[in-house]
Image (spheres, helix red, strand yellow):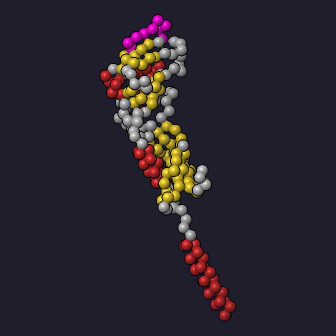
Amino acid sequence: MKKALNLKVFGVAAFLGAGLLLSGCKSAPELTAAQALTLIQAKYNEAPPSGASIAVNDLGMRQGITAKYWNRTTIYPNKYWADFTLTADGKKAVKLQNGGDVIQWRPSSATDENYSIVVITAASNHRKPHDVTNIQDEVLADGTTGKSASFTESVDLTGVPDALQGIAHNPGNRLSVKRQAEFALDGGAWKLKSTN
């Protein structure tokens, strides 16, 4: 009976000792998808908003004429080169990469389906992260332990006219891309370290 009592006392003491030992160890806080998303968006919001780059192919040029964003002002003897001048509505919707107001359309042939020019939306926005997945422990490049997560970054077309949004959805445009984010602990809280 005495041995059984000693075993119970020893078992309770061992259990309490293990509990004290474990309570002294601090584990890293959990990083949820919602927290990761908030951290990534906060980083994006620190940068100035910018216009989105939109590739305009032959279909897009025709859609832009229909939307009255540009008018053909010059056609060249080969019949497939042309100059298009931005209209007042076009200047409100887009900016040209060269800063001017004339699109120089110069495909290699009349049947060139790969030719496009790039316009920048006049509406400026921040990129939008979403769909954070695959949060996992990671050893970061500097040797510290942290976490990594996959997410999708999308162009925000808020304030972009409907016709220009239609052009943005034509083939050749990439409105979202998969990215990776790395997070490190800083003072017991997760901080975004980098995105790539």
Q: How many marks?
A: 0
In x, y percent, where is residue 129?
Answer: 46, 44
- Is residue 101 shown above or below 131? above
Determine the image quadrant of residue 19. Answer: bottom right
The location of residue 107, given as percent across then percent down, is 51, 16
Work out whether residue 133 can be spotted.
no
Point 46% across, 25% down: residue? 118
The answer to which of 145 and 133 lies nearer the viewer is 145
**On the picture, is 8 further left or further right than 61?**
right
Q: Residue at x 38, y 27 (%)?
A: 94
Q: Is residue 75 magenta?
A: yes
Residue 159 within the magenta-colored segment of the rendering: no
Residue 152, placed above or below residue 168: below
Which residue occupies 44% across, 47% down?
A: 43
Task: Looking at this view, name the residue that lies furthest to the bottom.
Answer: 2
Q: Residue at x 46, y 16 (%)?
A: 105
Question: Is 129 left, or right, of 145 in this rendering?
Answer: left
Q: Outermost residue, front direction?
A: 142
Query: In this view of the protein, can residue 93 be seen by the observer?
Result: yes
> In the figure, residue 100 lies in which quadrant?
top left
x, y (%) of residue 130? Answer: 47, 45
Q: Report the residue that reaches farthest toward the top.
A: 77
Q: Which quadrant holds the N terminus?
A: bottom right
Position of residue 63 relative to residue 27, above or below, is above
The magenta segment: 72-80
Q: Outermost residue, right direction?
A: 3
Vertical placement of 58 versus 78: above or below? below
State which quarter of the image contains the C terminus. top right
Picture coordinates of residue 49, whole percent (x, y) = 39, 39
